[in-house]
Image: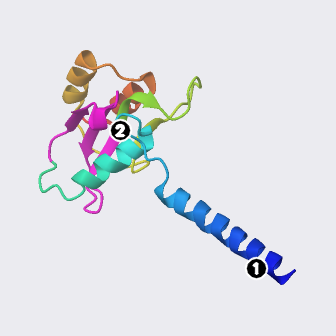
Amino acid sequence: MSRLIVALVIAVAALVLGIFWYRGHGPQPQPGQGTPWTVLQDIEEQHRADSSHDAPLLISHPEKSGYLVLGLPTSDPGFPWAWILLNEHAADNTPDAQPKMMPANARFHVDCAYIGTLLAQTPADPSVKALLQRRCTR
């Protein structure tokens, strides 16, 4: 009887350890399979220490994805860029859809002439267009 209990305890412990290992080492997203948020997080981390952030930065197909990401300068030294996904928004098929942006509600600055040229040449989600046109400066 005691051998059976010991065997059950060992089996349960092995199962629990296996689950924890799998959660930490399970399948990882391949390039082009990251979620929009992970793509934005990766870009934000890569560019956080940029020394120059005076002009907007357009990144096409980061991590072999289908996304277009616009980096706009902020005045925040901790987060010098606001990253906006141009071709997707957070809540599909709703009139008040918010663009996917990191950090959320960042205070960026961008010239309206740049936004006009960008939107004429680059496909962008309607909610992103509205946000950029509303918050640009003349």
Task: Determine whether, in the image, residue 55 is placed left or right of residue 61.
Answer: left
Outermost residue, left side: 52
**Residue 127 placement (x, y as % from top left):** 45, 27
Q: Is residue 78 magenta?
A: yes
Query: Disc 1 or disc 2, which is closer to the eye?
Result: 1
- SS assignment at label 2: strand
Residues packed near mark 1 inside 10 Å, few (<14), some (14 to 19) or many (20 plus): few
Quarter of the figure with residue 84: top left
Instruction: Tell which circle, 1 or 2, labels the residue nearer the N-terminal end.
Output: 1
| Badge 1 amino acid | Val
Outermost residue, bottom side: 2
What residue would you read off at disc 1?
6
Callout 1–callout 2 Cβ contact below 8 Å: no
Looking at the rendering, the stretch of residues picked out in magenta corresponds to 54-83
- Judge whether 120 appears above or below 22 on screen: above
**Residue 118 placement (x, y as % from top left):** 23, 24
> Which is more toward the observer, 9 or 99?
9
Q: How many marks?
A: 2
What residue would you read off at disc 2?
84
Residues packed near mark 2 inside 10 Å, few (<14), some (14 to 19) or many (20 plus): many
- SS assignment at label 1: helix
Identify the image quadrant of the N terminus.
Answer: bottom right
| Badge 2 amino acid | Ile
Task: Determine whether, in the image, residue 117 is placed left or right of residue 78.
Answer: left
Query: What is the distance, in whole Å, between disc 1 and disc 2 at their CAs?
Result: 55 Å
